[in-house]
Image (cartoon, helix red, strand yellow):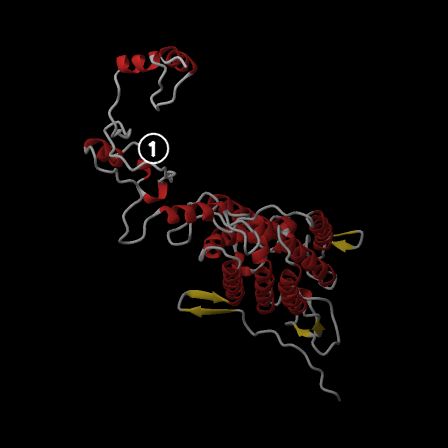
Amino acid sequence: MPLVASIPSPPQGVWYLGPIPIRAYALCIVLGVIIAVWMSERRWRARGGAPGTMIDIAVPAVIFGLIGGRLYHVITDWQLYFGPEAPNEPYEALFIWNGGLGIWGAVALGAVGVWLTCRKRGISLSAVADTVAPGIAIGQAIGRWGNWFNQELYGGPTDLPWGLEIDINKDGTVDGLYHPTFLYESIWNLVLAFVLIWAGKRFTLRHGRLFALYVAGYTLGRFWIEGLRIDPVGGVDHAVTFLSLRINQWTAIVLFVAALAFFFATRGKDTVEYVLPRDGSGPPGEGASADPAHAADQADEADTVRDADTAEKPADGEPAKADASATGDGPAADTASDEPGKPAETAKTDEVPVAKTDEAEAPVAKTGEPVKDEPVKDEAAQNDAKDDGVKDDGVKDDAGAVREEEKNPR
């Protein structure tokens, strides 16, 4: 008789540390979150973001995500808590550790927490979404193993060698093997994460397109995996269907179409994405300036201003440049006017070269005009010279030549 292989279910899903219960389902969720944040932090820093950003974003994202995931579960399975034949008390809707987190609600409301943090820090939501996409897929792959410990969300009966053993009479089951849908989804998400990492590098997907690819890829796998499950989603002892499809399958279809539409609608988008606070108010030591996506050899405007400021500062041991001397204001101009006969000291960088003339350099008076060495004739002497028809340079004019001829006739 051939030995039939199978996957056994854990004998228990909770351990007690004194009075404190340690639940395997919660441990899987926490481990998945830690791996996702760690991976996202590394990817964010590689993109140029500030260290610690993903950790700050993870806190509100996880809180909002847990609330959203539980709300989706309670809304779609409300008869388990509030129906006339509900097997649980209404207050047990708050017992997250018993299982029941809808990934759709977790991602949707978790995105609200991410958006609020991005808006507060001044960074682009689309850049964050593309960064965390592979990490979310890996976190889901790890978290799905919590369903294995709780013996829940399994598929229909199967005779495959990897069939899952479920305790008899667990949710109406009978002796036999069942599809380990938790394992199918875990493997699918791991493959999806590596595809996202490859596609992001190969095609440089930005502006939320990598996250849209994650949504499309996950919903594609979730659609066929959900078709294998037999857990009563929407009912107490049966799953609610519409046109032979379960609620989660319809959700997957809608999100798949929306993700593809967004992916192709943004294929030509090239706006700036900020990975550092755009208002320059980042944490100390992080540059505190916006870092838009650009080519490696293209400088930011803020970098250009900083370089100009650095160039104007004098080096150690060098005197500061005196810009006031160029305009005649300031200490350099006062020194030139207070000491007659002494050349003024001006800054080398602002001196205007003066053309040399044949005249010898003359001392400079207070007014800055050169003093002439030759004696200056008074006004009467100049008039007499004009009357005689003799110019200052000894050249006779026409009137002077006539008078000279009358005095000396030929």
Q: Residue at x 71, y 48 (%)?
A: 258
Look at mark 1 in the image and give the residue it sits on: 327
Which amino acid does the dot numbered 1 rest on? Thr
Q: Residue at x 26, y 40 (%)?
A: 345
Tell me which corner region of the image, top left, top right, bottom left or bottom right, holds residue 368: top left
Visible residue check, residue 69: no
Question: In x, y percent, where is residue 30?
Answer: 50, 63
Question: In x, y percent, where is residue 199?
Answer: 66, 62
Q: Is residue 347 left or right of residue 246?
A: left
Q: Is residue 82 above or below residue 17?
A: above
Question: In x, y percent, where is residue 57?
Answer: 49, 52
Split into 4 quadrants, where in the image is the N terminus?
bottom right
Q: Residue at x 26, y 22 (%)?
A: 376
Residue found farthest to the bottom: 1
Closer to the camera, 222 or 300? Answer: 300
Crowd around label 1: few <14 · some 14–19 · many ≥20 (10 Å) = few
Question: In x, y percent, where is residue 352?
Answer: 37, 39
Split into 4 quadrants, where in the image is the C terminus?
top left
Closer to the camera, 7 or 354? Answer: 354
Closer to the camera, 366 or 358? Answer: 358
